Amino acid sequence: MLKKLMLFLLFVFFCGINLSFGLDWKSLHEKADSMNLDDAQKACRDNPDSIEELYVLALAYLNLHKDKEAEEVFHRILALDPKISWAKWGLAEALRRKHQPQKSEDLINEVFKALPDFPPACITLAYINYNRLNFNQAVMLANKVLKQGEKKVDRNNYVRALLLYAGTKGTIAHYGGALSKLINGTAVLRNLKAADKLQPESAAVSFGLGSYYLLAPALAGGNLEKAKAHLKKAVAIDPHFPDAYVRLAQLYKIKGDNAAYSRYLNKALEIDPQNELAQDISSGRCKFICPYK
């Protein structure tokens, strides 16, 4: 009887170890956010078959916009274990950045079958829906992450959820009537400030604040000088952030500086020729809001 009990306890112990990998994605995301690329690469050289170290390396590549390298590492993880849903999400995120939204969404749906509330997958799909102008769906997905709370979500993805929620609410307010502007518009700055409190040195947060001050009417706090300061900060932190260059281009167009407008818009297109915001502005469609229209 004692022998059976010991075997049972060992079984539970080892199952717990296996399950812990599936449950500890948050710590790996936070590790990647605090680790430089050289250290992540060294850890993988020392442990070439470690799924944990490979995952951290792939995340480090994503953080540096090295999407091709990240995609290759996610493929390596899936070659070791095709059932790792995190790696499927990583491929989906890389595909989203390569402007292949349908392929990305198909992979996200596979992830949701195993991990229905996986925050990074919710964020990726929220971006896809935003770019498709499915704003209500984007808000729902961002809110799904926020409802899980800061204790269950890594800081980067929690901040992204705040920014997505704020930015999408602002777009909904822009296209809505007076009641929509009152209900949705008032949610924007509150969530941006919450994100700024958590990550004041984030390029994405600076971009969000800069966009708000650029696009909001003066009565709601719009301020071109504040917009300029935040957007300049965004590109200083992350020089490979095309959306921030697009909003800077719009700012200079308002100021009547067409040379600066062209310079910043061309910079965005140089970084990412298929960038949705840059394409929207340069085409004149302005679905994502032109403050001078």
Image: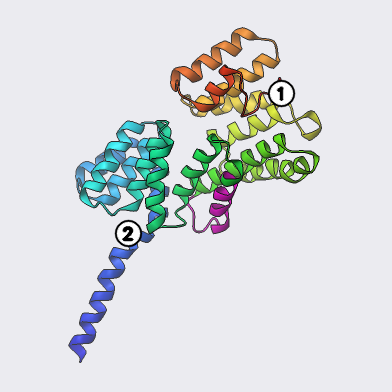
Q: Quadrant of residue 252?
A: top right
Q: 10 Å neighbourhood of mark 2: few (<14), some, or many (≥20)? A: few
Observer able to see residue 275: yes
- Residue at left 53%, top 49%? 158
- Quarter that holds the C terminus: top right
Q: Is residue 163 above or below residue 28?
A: above
- Residue at left 53%, top 43%? 160
Give coordinates of residue 286: x percent, y percent. Answer: 62, 24
- Quarter that holds the N terminus: bottom left
Q: Which residue is mark 2?
A: 21
Residue 144 forms part of the magenta stretch: yes
- Residue at left 42%, top 31%? 99
Extreme left residue here?
3
Q: Quadrant of residue 10?
A: bottom left
Residue 190 forms part of the magenta stretch: no
Q: Which residue is mark 1?
A: 224
Extreme top residue here?
259
Label 1 sits on a secondary structure element that is: helix
Residue 45 falls left or right of residue 91:
left
Q: Is residue 19 above or below residue 222?
A: below
Q: Is residue 290 above or below residue 31?
A: above
Q: Is residue 13 above or below residue 94?
A: below
Q: Is most of the magenta stretch helix, strand or loop?
A: helix
Residue 8 falls left or right of residue 175:
left
- Number of numbered discs on residues: 2
Viewer-closest of 163 and 156: 163
Per the rendered image, the range of residues in magenta is 138-154
Give coordinates of residue 163: x percent, y percent. Answer: 59, 41
Give coordinates of residue 200: x percent, y percent. Answer: 58, 39
Q: Quadrant of residue 245?
A: top right
- Residue at left 79%, top 29%? 218
Of marks 1 and 2, which one's residue comes earlier in the chain? Answer: 2
